[in-house]
Image (cartoon, coloured by chain):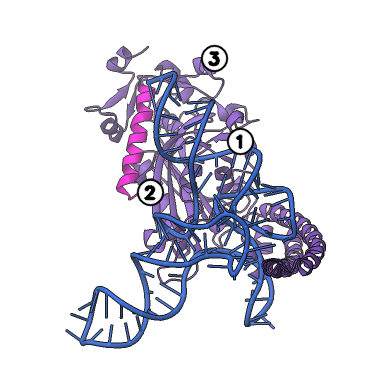
Amino acid sequence: MLELKRLRDAPALVKDALLRRGWQDTRVVDEVLALDKQHRAHLTARQSLQARQNRAAQAIGRLMRQKDTNAAQAHIREQSRLKQEIKAADADLDRMQAALDALLLSIPNVPDASVPAGRAAKDNVVVHERGHRPQFAFKPQPHWVLTQTHQLVDFARGAKVAGAGFPFFVGDGARLQRALVQYFLASAQSAGYLEVQPPLVVGEASAHGTGQLPDKEGQMYRLLEDNLYLIPTAEVPLTNLYRGEILAETRLPIRLCGYTPCFRREAGSYGKDVRGLNRLHQFDKVEIVQITRPEDSGTVLEQMVQHAEVLLEQLELPYRRLLMCTGEMGFNQTKQYDLEVWSGGQARWLEVSSVSNFKAFQAHRLRLRYRPASGGKPRLAHTLNGSALALPRIVAALLENNQRADGTIQLPSILSRHAGIDGDWVIGAQAARDRRI
RNA sequence: GGAGGGGUGGCAGAGUGGUCUAAUGCACUGGUCUUGAAAACCAGCGUACCAUCCGGUACCGGGGGUUCGAAUCCCUCCCCCUCCGCCA
């Protein structure tokens, strides 16, 4: 949610932002300004009424104490009329405020000046591509074949027990996920992020705070009895951690990381793009979040995306970084990078990370502020988050890229260490077959 | 799940319908004094909104109600504490 003050001060900037995002019509900005002007006029009038009432009430109190009941009664009769006026004025104000909020909520964040204009995926800019795509002397298999061959993931029984998109990870499959989580968390910690285990459900207020509500309600699983939502990403609880607080400037930047399962309904997505591990209703992810001073968020975004890239490099996965264009970027973002890994068996790019700077857009709804060290009024902080990283597609790419002619899969050495394995970790070797269920 | 007790400004803590829409203490900031510090004294010290200025309005866990007037009374929801029940 944009700050009203910002629209008032620079309506042209917001209109320009809407056009860059591909909106045809910027009248909503003028509507907000007109309504805001009307609202403020009414507010001022309402407050003078209240001031009159307060003064009269005090006068009545004085008269009552002096036992001057007649004079007090005269005032009280007058007050009834004032009361009606105030009631009517309040109804008007509530209506205007609700209309104003609805309009403001419909306006997306202003893209950073460095974000390219565009409408579709083809307009995203490939910032760079790193690593080498694997060359196979044989026909490489997609991961859904490899997971079946080596009994790493049980999609069928997952569908039986919970439904499509809820697989069982089994044996080396489960162990691989555990090693990845351990590795990602260890890296985040050594980069200065504080590890946090957040709740996996959040209340309505938190879902509003980070912008999952009202737009993306359909994406979340909901616990109706208790009015809770299963988190679609750790971003929600982590960014809400300091909701409504005023932090000392010296505490910034706050760096948080957390591993959680993520739950997404993803209604209406079917087809080959979602086969196997490509898209699940439940998946694991390590998330990094930062709360910064406004002047730092630009630099911090670059640091965060680089952090995620180093993970991919150490996993020896070929990847590319995309700078999302204005039209592909999320509603709440000012700037967003996506990281995609090359998955050799499917011969396609898979998105494994999205790193974004929200500037003050989330902080405004979160009422997340900091007090400048120099003193003075609290200011809105900036919030950023990124995946570092999302697991299942990493698993898919690791399996597909590292498959060998004999059908075995040799995982990168860094994972052996985090899985507690001495030497090479080769899936499909005799030792692994012995562990099958 | 049941019974009882509570939620007041950074912290502590008064205030049970009207002369403050929040006393007082601590902490914090500035000043006086001092070679410096401490102490003492003086002043300031929540958040948000409206108003060109003077100033005004709201917030005592959230929401609603009663009243001329609500931190105070009523309803409702949330949270915390104690005890009981259940339980990894």
Q: Kindly identify which chain the residue marked by label 1 belongs to.
A: A
| Residue at mark 3 shares a chain with residue at mark 2 | yes
| Residue at mark 3 shares a chain with residue at mark 1 | yes
SS state under label 2: helix
SS state under label 3: helix
Q: Kindly identify which chain the residue marked by label 3 belongs to.
A: A
Q: Pointer 3: what residue?
A: A160
Going by the numbered disc 2, the residue's amino acid type is His
Identify the mark nearer the N-term, 3 or 2: 3
Q: Pointer 2: what residue?
A: A307
x and y percentages locating residue B56 in the rendered image: 66, 71
Relative to A344, A77 lies left or right: right
Which quadrant of the rendered structure holds the N terminus of chain A?
Answer: bottom right
User: Which residues fall within the magenta stretch?
Assistant: A172-193
Identify the mark nearer the N-term, 1 or 2: 1
Q: In the rendered image, is residue A28 in sight?
A: yes
Going by the numbered disc 3, the residue's amino acid type is Lys
Q: Is residue A175 magenta?
A: yes
Q: Are marks 3 and 2 in contact (CB under 8 Å)?
A: no
Which quadrant of the rendered structure holds the C terminus of chain A?
Answer: top left
Q: Nearer the viewer, mark 3 or mark 2?
A: 3
Q: Kindly identify which chain the residue marked by label 2 belongs to.
A: A
Identify the mark nearer the N-term, 3 or 1: 3
> Which chain is in purple here?
A
SS state under label 1: helix
